[in-house]
Amino acid sequence: MKKHNGMRPQDIVVLLKIIALKHDNWKNVDLAYALQISASEISEVLNRCRIAGLIDAKKRKVHLNAFSEFLVYGLKYVFPTEPGAMVRGIPTAHSASPVNEHISSGGDVYVWPYAKGNQRGQAIEPLYKTLPAIIQEDKLFYELLTIVDTIRVGRTREIEIAIRELEKRLQHA
């Protein structure tokens, strides 16, 4: 039996991508290519998530209730982040859809640092370094990631909105 050495940020990214795919006939190499993560790391992620009970034994379907519970109650403690310096980047957290549709940010803009980004704001470290370069191709994946970042860094009202938006998207997964 394999030992579980704790969750890693890319575990969250891979599970969110699986949810965004909306089917279970993907291959590890497809995830690796889409996320710019090595195929061997995808395999390790899936093993950790299986041991943690976040994905089924065949490593094809995310256990949505367990994963949602982890995101809502554990994520900000396991993978905390704080806004950093002003940088150019891609909007995230409450500065991006769908959370920004419900609130006025009051001038606080959070971004993933990215030289090709279109907005300036306070830097939020993405869960995985390749995210700013790959999210343009998958709207649902990007929304899930911004919801997760809102949970990681948001204030109470923003987090409540993010949780509602997460629940909406997981109902249709």
Image (cartoon, rainbow, N blue to C red):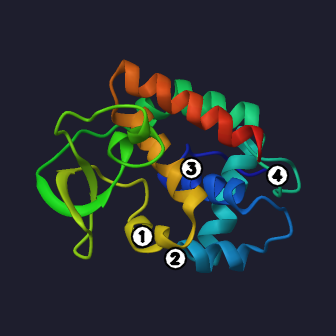
Q: Quadrant of residue 69?
A: top right
Q: Residue at x 84, y 47 (%)?
A: 56
**Residue at the image position 74 percent from the left and 31 percent from the top:** 65
Check whether the beta carbons of the residues at disc 1 and disc 3 lie within 8 A of each other. no
Q: Secondary structure at mark 2?
A: loop
Q: Which residue is label 2 attached to?
A: 36
Picture coordinates of residue 16, whole percent (x, y)? 62, 53
Q: Are marks 3 and 2 in contact (CB under 8 Å)?
A: no
Q: Is residue 155 left or right of residue 148?
A: left
Q: Which mark is residue 12?
A: 3
Q: Secondary structure at mark 3?
A: helix
**Which residue occupies the foreground of this view, 27 or 48?**
27
Instruction: Give the tally of numbered discs.
Output: 4
* Left or right of 85, for residue 53: right
Q: Earlier along the polypeptide chain: callout 2 or callout 4?
A: 2
Residue identifier under label 1:
130
Q: Are marks 3 and 4 in contact (CB under 8 Å)?
A: no
Q: Is residue 135 visible?
A: yes
Q: Amino acid at mark 1?
A: Thr
Res. 61 mark: 4
- Amino acid at dot 2: Gln
